Image (cartoon, helix red, strand yellow):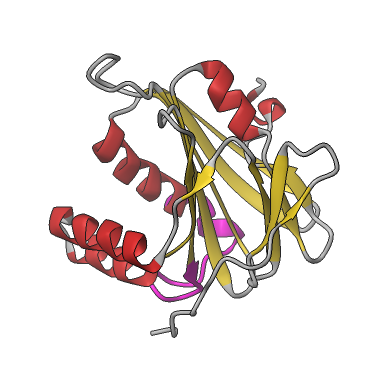
Amino acid sequence: MAALWTVTLMAQTPDRNGKSRHFESGLGFTYDVPTDLAIISSKQFDQAIREKALQQATTGQETKSINCSQQLLAAENRDESKILQIVASPQGCATGIVIETNLAQLGQYSSGEIAKRFGAAHPEYATFIVGKHLFWAMRSETTPAPPKNPNHEIALLITYTPTAVIECLISARTPEDLAALSATALKFDDGGETQLLPAEAFRK
């Protein structure tokens, strides 16, 4: 099994317009976080999330995936109407090595787990390429609808590097909030750059 990393949030720098902060992952990519989101990721938070997920796991594969994953970022705004999470796993830890031919299979598995957690109605799926990187994406409304589930929009983005598998989850109260978080920048050290969820990826 691949060794897990020790990951900490590295020094952040604001962008020129003051609307986001820039983070280095230490894993070959950087990402921006809007300034209206508070960073809530910590060792204690990550452990609490992991323990809860392990209690809810129903298969050995779920347990293995949870133990392999590491939360790089958890951020939310004051009323939790916008939530952004970024999780990474070492290549080959939870599954076989993720490459172009099996990325969609991983995406379907991960989106199924998301559907269990949030519910999903009318999901849309997409794949797209930015630079050298292939992405798989899903967006959906959640069920049940508000007020039982106030955050009514979810989206998932998955990609990989030679050393890591990266999953980004967005939960938002409105389509406008989802669009705002989807515009968050994800940049790779080799020059590839994308929004977390480009709108054009879902155009027919």
The residue closer to the viewer here, 187 or 204, is 187
The residue closer to the viewer here, 82 or 126, is 82
Residue 117: x and y in percent read 26, 39
The residue closer to the viewer here, 109 or 27, is 27
**Magenta residue span:** 89-105
Residue 89: x and y in percent read 46, 68
- In the figure, is residue 13 to the left or right of 203? right
Residue in the picture at 26% in, 60% down? 48
Residue in the picture at 74% in, 44% down? 194
Residue 100: say if magenta. yes
Q: Quadrant of residue 177?
A: top right
Residue in the picture at 63% in, 68% down? 10
Whether residue 165 is visible here, answered yes or no, is yes
Residue 194: say if magenta. no
- Whether residue 181 is situated above or below residue 174 in the rendered picture: below
Q: Quadrant of the C terminus?
A: top right
Q: Quadrant of residue 201?
A: top right
Residue 199: x and y in percent read 67, 26
Whether residue 94 is visible here, answered yes or no, is no
- In the figure, is residue 12 to the left or right of 104? right
Q: Quadrant of residue 101?
A: bottom right
- In the figure, is residue 36 to the left or right of 191? left
Q: Quadrant of the N terminus?
A: bottom left
Q: How many marks?
A: 0
Residue 52: x and y in percent read 20, 56
